[in-house]
Image: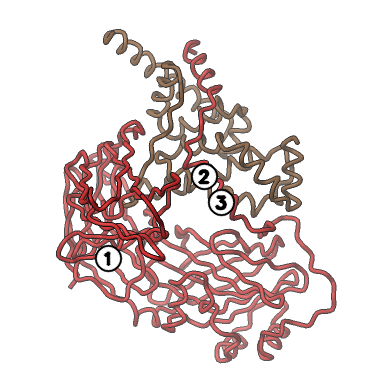
């Protein structure tokens, strides 16, 4: 081994550099907002429920209590499940979700009622409802047990149960967040999966859900759940535009666009040189160039199609929508696989005094962000700006710097479009007083873009 | 108070002990996330998720002495989640803040630049080994790979760095 390199690496390792201020503050923010007591949602050390004489939760109606009693022996009774389907056990769990996009499921009656129950290890798990659409599979459940202490889980901050899932007997890629509330000893929760499928679903798809751990207790709670697509279909607008575009050596085909009020998805088939597989990305806008938001995404298996090319499908997840656009603008990025260089990012502070506006920020690729106005209102501060060039500048990184040097992030992730005739937007921040400035960055790392349009008829 | 006692107290629900533990690891959390992710804002996202995850699940940790290994593993998982999406979709809020460069010697800046040129897998093992002072076995546990793979990645990284640093030195010499 090269001794000099070894020495240099050891010297580098000893050089404990300063953490950037904003990073340190970000850590402080999360530490300052920790709940008072940790909620060990899936701790191995099972918390045993105090053995006090407690009646079964009062919030469940009598029908449900009796049913749990009958079924509570580890098997599913289809007859009982059918009976339960017809009995409104409790209001929809979706109606109390912390996630606004999930309360829509209840408001628009998009969920399918199941009420399948399995009891094992003294824990009764009931799958009450499911929703499937727009790349999202959501399952509502209740857990009841006299044996373990059930805990509240704030959305995305804990794992109350562990499971394996198959759709039509096939594995599928998914990322999951949970939320769970506990009332009178009964947990009501939601398993929220963003999913990517390798192929279209069958007409009557089936979800095999095998729950293997609840509140730290290992057991077996297995369900075979029909995925009812009928209710979702009524609220879903699906398009198969098959619009293709080529850029340099890459080819893209927009195969499917699906809008639902809960979440939307776009599936793009991509054929690119093998070596450039990770170089491309997408942003999606409506026909007027307004961002459709971003909820994540996933990719299918990669197929080697020969001649140095590979093919796979990207699933891009977007916000749910009631109104369907008449077309899409898809901005494709290529970073050419180059190493990212922090040194090419420049910090900028724009004074927000009326006398100095409009203020134009010029980007290395010729794009512009023009700050046109600012309003310091009683309850918020609004910054107005126009963009030219890259559409993704509408959601540029902006922070408001107030008099004491503190930087405030925008209230919403997405900017608000203020004029459809121009690319004009606004971002709102917390209320402020006195002199303020806008903090942003200009990134000179090389990223090329290409835009193509998709008509949705 | 030593870290093991802090971990035990955090496991018993002492929030201040948990805060103290995390603050003492701030530089490590930053460096490890930076080895995998490029943007500082994404590093912060990953670290914030890691802190919440660790706070929620700290009672699962059986051996307090493995806290550092345990939280580093959580952090790497969080970074990989972001990286997986990032490789396929360039986010619109692709904002980036520059790393604060302190008063470093030229030589160290050169090494950092060279490390930045490595593939993320190699950058990660180099960071865990030299910056975090973790053993081959600990790195293997964190990354869920064989010790032999850690060694070969370290060797590949050293070889590449050797080439990059030599080239850099020659380039500078000519320039001077």
Q: Specify few, some or many for label 3: CA neighbours under 10 Å numbering under 14, 14-19, or 20 or more.
A: some
Residue found 56% across the figure and 46% down from its top: A28
Lateral position of residue A340 relative to residue A185, left or right: left
Query: Vertical placement of B53 versus A362: above or below?
Result: below
User: From mark 2 to mark 1, how far is it between C-alphas?
Assistant: 42 Å
Percent position (x, y) of residue A184?
Answer: 71, 78
Q: Nearer the viewer, mark 1 or mark 3?
A: 3
As drawn, the chain in red is A
Lateral position of residue A201 relative to residue B23, left or right: left
Residue bearing mark 2: A25
Q: Colour of chain B?
A: brown
- Give SS at disc 2: helix
User: From mark 1 to mark 3, how far is it between C-alphas?
Assistant: 39 Å
User: From mark 3 to mark 2, how far is it between C-alphas?
Assistant: 9 Å
Q: Nearer the viewer, residue A187 or A242?
A: A187
Residue found 38% across the figure and 47% down from its top: B86
């Amino acid at each position: 081994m090269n001794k000099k390199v070894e020495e240099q690496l050891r010297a580098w390792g000893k050089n404990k550099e300063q953490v950037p201020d904003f990073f340190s503050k970000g850590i402080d923010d999360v530490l300052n907002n920790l709940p008072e007591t940790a909620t060990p949602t899936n701790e191995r050390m099972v918390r045993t429920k105090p053995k006090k004489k407690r009646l079964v939760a009062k919030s469940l109606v009598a029908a449900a209590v009796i049913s749990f009693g009958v079924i509570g022996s580890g098997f599913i009774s289809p007859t009982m499940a059918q009976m339960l389907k017809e009995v409104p056990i409790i209001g929809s769990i979706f109606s109390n979700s912390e996630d606004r996009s999930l309360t829509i499921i209840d408001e628009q009656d998009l969920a399918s009622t199941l009420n399948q129950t399995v009891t094992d290890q003294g824990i009764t798990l009931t799958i009450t409802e499911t929703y499937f659409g727009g790349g999202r599979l959501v399952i509502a459940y209740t857990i009841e047990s006299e044996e373990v202490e059930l805990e509240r889980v704030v959305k995305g901050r804990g794992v109350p149960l562990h499971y394996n899932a198959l759709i039509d007997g096939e594995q599928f890629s998914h990322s999951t967040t949970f939320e769970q509330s506990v009332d009178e000893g009964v947990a009501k929760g939601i398993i929220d999966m963003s999913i990517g499928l390798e192929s279209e679903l069958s007409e009557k798809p089936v979800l095999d859900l095998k729950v293997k751990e609840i509140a730290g207790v290992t057991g077996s709670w297995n369900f075979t759940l029909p995925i009812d697509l009928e209710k979702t279909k009524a609220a879903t607008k699906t398009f198969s535009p098959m619009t293709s575009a080529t850029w340099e050596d890459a080819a893209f085909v927009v195969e499917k666009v699906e809008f639902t009020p809960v979440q939307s998805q776009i599936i793009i088939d991509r054929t690119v040189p093998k070596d450039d597989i990770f170089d491309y990305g997408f942003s999606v806008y409506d026909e007027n160039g307004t961002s459709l938001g971003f909820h994540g995404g996933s990719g299918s298996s990669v197929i080697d199609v020969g001649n140095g090319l590979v093919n796979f499908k990207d699933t891009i997840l977007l916000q749910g929508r009631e109104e369907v656009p008449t077309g899409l603008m898809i901005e494709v990025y290529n970073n050419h696989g180059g190493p990212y260089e922090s040194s090419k990012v420049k910090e900028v502070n724009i004074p927000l005094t009326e006398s100095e506006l409009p203020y134009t920020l010029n980007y290395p690729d010729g794009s512009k962000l023009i700050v046109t106005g600012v309003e310091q209102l009683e309850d918020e501060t609004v910054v107005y700006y126009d963009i030219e060039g890259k559409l993704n500048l509408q959601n540029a990184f902006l922070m408001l710097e107030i008099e004491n040097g503190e930087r405030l992030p925008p209230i919403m992730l997405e900017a608000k479009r203020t004029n459809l005739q121009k690319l004009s937007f606004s971002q709102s921040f917390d209320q402020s007083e006195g002199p303020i400035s806008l903090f942003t960055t200009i990134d000179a790392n090389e990223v090329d873009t290409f835009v193509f349009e998709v008509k949705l008829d | 108070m030593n870290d093991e006692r802090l971990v035990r107290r955090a496991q018993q629900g002492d929030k201040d002990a948990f805060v103290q533990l995390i603050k003492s690891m701030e530089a490590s959390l930053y460096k490890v996330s930076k080895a995998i992710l490029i943007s500082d804002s994404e590093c912060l996202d990953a670290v914030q998720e890691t802190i919440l995850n660790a706070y929620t699940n700290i009672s699962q940790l059986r051996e307090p002495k493995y806290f550092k290994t345990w939280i580093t593993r959580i952090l790497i998982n969080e970074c990989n989640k972001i990286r997986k999406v990032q490789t396929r979709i360039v986010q619109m809020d692709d904002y980036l803040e520059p790393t604060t460069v302190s008063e470093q010697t030229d030589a160290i800046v050169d090494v950092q630049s060279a490390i930045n040129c490595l593939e993320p897998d190699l950058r990660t093992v180099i960071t865990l080994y030299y910056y975090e002072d973790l053993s081959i076995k600990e790195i293997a546990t964190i990354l869920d790979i064989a010790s032999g793979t850690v060694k070969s990645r370290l060797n590949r990284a050293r070889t590449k760095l050797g080439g990059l640093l030599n080239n850099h030195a020659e380039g500078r010499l000519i320039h001077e």
